[in-house]
Amino acid sequence: MSFKFGTIFITHVFGESHGTCVGAVVEGCPPGLTLETRDVQEELDKRRPGRSPYVTPRREKDTVAIESGIYRGVTTGAPILMRIENRDVDDSVYERFTQTPRPGHADLTARAKYHGHHDHRGGGIFSGRMTAALVMAGAVARKVLAMHGITVCAHLVQMGNVRVRDDLSDEEIKEIPYTNPFHCADEDAIAPMRETLERAMAERDSVGARIECRVCNMPMGIGEPFFDSVESVVSHAIFSVPGVKGISFGCGFDAVTMRGSECNDPYGVRGGRVVTEKNDAGGVLGGLTNGMPVIFDVALKPTPSIGREQRTVDLATMEETTMAIEGRHDPCIGIRAVPVIEHVTTMAMADLVRRASL
């Protein structure tokens, strides 16, 4: 089992979806950084459930408590323990899933690994509820990156077949996403996204999504080849987010159909520094940052909990059966995953920056 991420800036997560709490312990945060409870709370509120008709109706206040590592509003250098309580839990619908695994969920694989001893309620440790711990850690990591002027922002770029326009400015991506319930920087895409989501909900179904994340002002040369390249570390962290099925940096899989003359990023000089004239590399060459924004896309699958009838098996009788999942679920996990991807990236970058001894 592995509930720890990082080498110097280390994040531990704990709790389960329907346990008493969910939380994180952060080690390796330098002393003397200003950190108030409200700094973490503001970030948690971005992913909190029950805030719109397009996310799970589970209502949690997600009020964070910081138990250690902070004194008089600054970090002490000691481990920082943060937690939120689980209050709005409903275990009634989950008992039958111990014998009839839900398609698309970890019920069957968890049963195999933990021999039936795991907490299955609400998905347990496999639930999206655990991403609250990642946001808490990311809120601390944001303070570390701010010391170096590094910023991280994410936004929803695709829901189903609806895509945002390609010419979004950096200002739009930084300012607009958290002003609307879809965390989308293209205001013209919101209406068709809403239609797509409402149609899926009416059909008791769900939709997938794609999120873009940008890391700006990263110094050149950050990364730890061979196995801890920037892409390796970020991908490792991103795949801790439930529902993630893919990641691509820069031009990604489009590179397959390009020629070298198209894919290579020509160099130039701007303001006395070497820059690339475009950024198909996504800000990374040889596993090291090249000084351009680190840009990558993350693909998230449709929410597996749907009200439509699906085929499964009864493990007690080893016979095939069907099920329709009731309960409180996000029709598109990509919406609330935007701040999660943002903070997991922040967490990963903080560790890389600390490893570079900046």
Image (spheres, grey):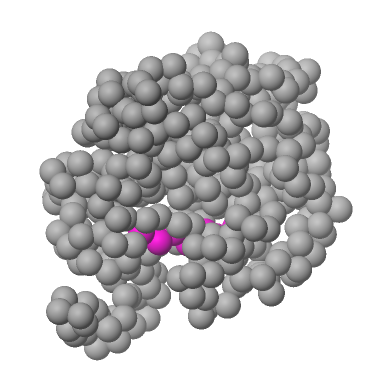
| Residue ranking furthest to the front | 72
Residue visible at 81% across and 57% down in the picture? 198
Q: Is residue 232 left or right of residue 94?
A: left
Residue placed most toward the observer, 86 or 63: 63
| Residue ranking furthest to the bottom | 261
Residue visible at 15% across and 47% down in the picture? 358
Q: Position of residue 86 (x, y in %)?
A: 63, 20
Q: Is residue 212 magenta?
A: yes
Indicate whether 11 appears above or below 306: above
Residue visible at 30% across and 35% down in the picture? 33
Q: Is residue 297 magenta?
A: no
Indicate whether 43 appears above or below 149: above
Q: Position of residue 105 (x, y in %)?
A: 60, 35
| Residue ranking furthest to the right | 202
The secondary structure that dominates the magenta segment is strand
Q: Position of residue 28 (x, y in %)?
A: 25, 30
| Residue ranking furthest to the top | 117
- In this rendering, does residue 215 appear at all? yes
The quarter of the displayed image where residue 100 is located: top right
Question: What range of the chain is rendered magenta?
Answer: 209-215
- In this rendering, does residue 315 appear at all? no
Residue visible at 58% across and 77% down in the picture? 165
Q: Quadrant of the N terminus?
A: top left
Q: Position of residue 108 (x, y in %)?
A: 57, 27
